[in-house]
Amino acid sequence: MLSSSCSLLYLNSDDDFQVEFDRTRNLLVIVEQGVAPALEDELDIYRVDLASDGINVRVMSWTGGNAADLREYISQSIKNNATDSVFLVGSMPAAWYEQYASKGNEEFPCDLYLMDPECVWEDGDSDGIFDKHSEIKVRISVSRVIGSSDELTAYFGKLHAYRTGDLSLPVGAYLFKDDDWYDFQTGSSFGLSRIYSNVAIDENPPITLRDKYFMNMTGASAEFVNQWIHSYPSALFVQEDSRYSPVTTLDIGNRDLRGLFYNLFDCSAARFTEENLGMTYLVRTNYALAVFGSTKVGGSYQSLIFYDVLSKRGTWGDAYKTWYNRYGKRSDSWFLGMVILGDPALMVTTTGVHYRAIDMSLPVEPDATWIKTLEDTFWTMDWATNAGNYSDYRAVNPSFFGK
């Protein structure tokens, strides 16, 4: 296990912080028709594994349609089957949103469209991209995994191996905070200490280097990884003095980076509509199981609620739903693109220790000045908005638009 540089005081009390949440009981798995036959055996095993966790699983094949059709299908499942979580397997349609955020216009895939069937979404200029919505309350979590039949088969194999104890990494967390954020809440685990007694932190510019990232992510590593690195969908850019060294999706797969759970404070790293970092960790390494990240500029700078739910044996989907309803809904500019990738029914290791009260590691709520500073660090990077747009998405996926 990586050595820890996090100073903590642990108490066995829940009095300091309380987050209530509804646990996932009924999961709907929607599988792209083209990959469904290849996954029959894996999905049977998956259903049995989740039954052991008290989760009922229904598997349905998706034969085609647009994002509105998918939303209606999910809505009916909520009404008829009390569905509280959805796992999309394979290539499925996505809704897009456009807004002016901080310093620029952006358009991005938005899975929150699927998570609240009562929310009203509007397209004021009739260009196919939503630009306004009513209040959002996440009623179900929705997650995705996308890949070839072989990649998806291997991914479900990892899920079974994890749940049966055959896939594991040292119980702990690794936090890599690159130069632009080195002095943002120095020494904080940002709430990871609610789950792990060992949180290793790299946050000093002399050591937050590309080679150090690779060394830790291919060596001792840790079960949970939280990284703060500039990026666009298919590459990280680690700052080294006045230059930036790339970590590409090819690097991630070829080096088989080690980490089971990821919180990516990396711009557009979970932009699942194109080649992206988040999905690469999931389907091109032998380890990754779940990702929390953004399809747009930004990420989660305050994940305490997310981690707290995980520490109480909530699922990845439970954590997302609770985090968004309690915190993410505060800012579309920051959080409207936040998604989860991978199995939403995952829980962190059963051997992790549930620590409750935190002393020096407890993250402080950033004030407006700090949030503005965080935004500025993203938008000053030219590559922050270097991502495919809605027109590209339509061209690549004509079947999602009836063509």
Image (tube, helix red, strand yellow):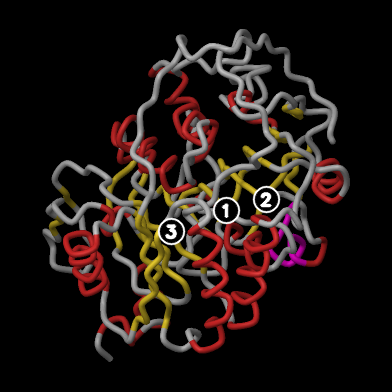
User: For the residue carrying disc 3, how many other residues have a C-alpha within 10 Å: few (<14), some (14-19), or many (20+)?
Assistant: many
Circles 1 and 2: CB atoms closer than 8 Å = yes
Of the pair 273 and 111, the residue shown nearer to us: 111
Circles 1 and 3: CB atoms closer than 8 Å = yes
Taking the spot 70% from the left edge, 61% from the top edge, the residue there is 161
Q: Earlier in the sequence, mark 1 or mark 3?
A: 3
User: For the residue carrying disc 2, how many other residues have a C-alpha within 10 Å: few (<14), some (14-19), or many (20+)?
Assistant: many
The span from disc 1 to disc 3 (Cα, nearest Å) is 9 Å
Task: Name the residue carrying label 1.
Answer: 290
Q: Does 62 lie within the magenta span?
A: no
- In what quadrant of the picture does the C terminus appear? bottom left
Q: Is residue 66 above or below residue 377?
A: below
Query: Which mark, by number, is residue 260?
Result: 2
| Magenta segment, prevailing SS (helix, strand or loop) | helix
The region drawn magenta spans 246-253
The span from disc 1 to disc 2 (Cα, nearest Å) is 7 Å
Q: Is 285 on the left-hand or right-hand side of 96? A: right
- In what quadrant of the picture does the N terminus appear? top right
- In the picture, residue 22 is in which quadrant? top left
Q: Amino acid at mark 3?
A: Ser
Residue 227 visible in the shown view = no
Taking the spot 60% from the left edge, 42% from the top edge, the residue there is 348
Q: Earlier in the sequence, mark 2 or mark 3?
A: 3
Q: Earlier in the sequence, mark 1 or mark 2?
A: 2
Task: Name the residue carrying label 3.
Answer: 143
Q: Position of residue 182 (x, y in %)?
A: 67, 24
Taking the spot 36% from the left edge, 46% from the top edge, the residue there is 104
Q: Position of residue 33 (x, y in %)?
A: 41, 86
